[in-house]
Image (spheres, grey):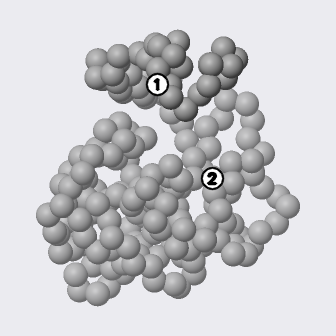
Amino acid sequence: MNKRSGKDPDPKPNENFVPILHFSARNWKGEFVTAARKALVDSGASHTLITKSLADRLGLKINPGGRGFLTVSGKAQACWTTKLEFKFDELTRHTVLMSRAFIVDGDMARYDMIIGQNVLRSVKADVNFSTNTVSVGEYSVPFVKVEVPVCEVHAEQEEAERVLNKGKKLLEAKYKPADLDEVVAESTALNPDQKKGL
């Protein structure tokens, strides 16, 4: 845990820095368990996700209710939800946070938790990619340097392109492209001079 200073990590070209926090979570006995739990801060994720193995280890009450997500490790299907109590000693000191979390049955790229916007907003966290830090109030934690094999980077890019292309094909199949000249000609809201101007 570091107080904010002007000395933030200065990444070199081609280095991959990722916002990772360590956390402890309350188990079914009411005890906080640390055991080097890693959470990925994902400012693009709307919700917080945890692995089924973590929920089982903590003995959390699991409720039905799922949905699909796109994560850094690809597609994830959450089949359950739970109430999670946890803390980030690096940032929030001894403040216990509580959040509804979706449970994913599978691996999340070696992370036990993906921290989504619901938690980031509640603690007023700043995820700053220009300084490679995550900050809450006066406390700041640097991003962690990770080694990512080139094949994983290409696989993620290919998966993202595949998903985008699939969406594009679905839209093209469902909706025929509009004939703008025809739309303008049929418009009753435009007078003839306005139609000519388009």
Answer with the quarter of the image where residue 158 lies.
top left
Answer with the quarter of the image where residue 115 lies.
bottom left
Q: What is the secondary structure assignment of the residue under circle 1? A: helix
Q: Quadrant of the N terminus?
A: bottom right
Looking at the image, which residue is at 63% across and 57% down? 127
Q: Are marks 1 and 2 in contact (CB under 8 Å)?
A: no
- Counting every numbered tag in the picture gives 2
Q: Vertically, is 84 above or below 196?
A: below
Residue reaching furthest to the front: 192
Task: Name the residue beneath numbered marker 1.
Answer: 157
* Labelled disc at residue 143: 2
Q: Vertically, is 109 above or below 179?
A: below
| Residue 74 horizontal/vertical position (percent) | 35, 36
| Left or right position of 170 against 10 | left
Q: Quadrant of the C terminus?
A: top right
Q: Vertically, is 26 above or below 52?
A: below
What amino acid is at disc 2? Phe
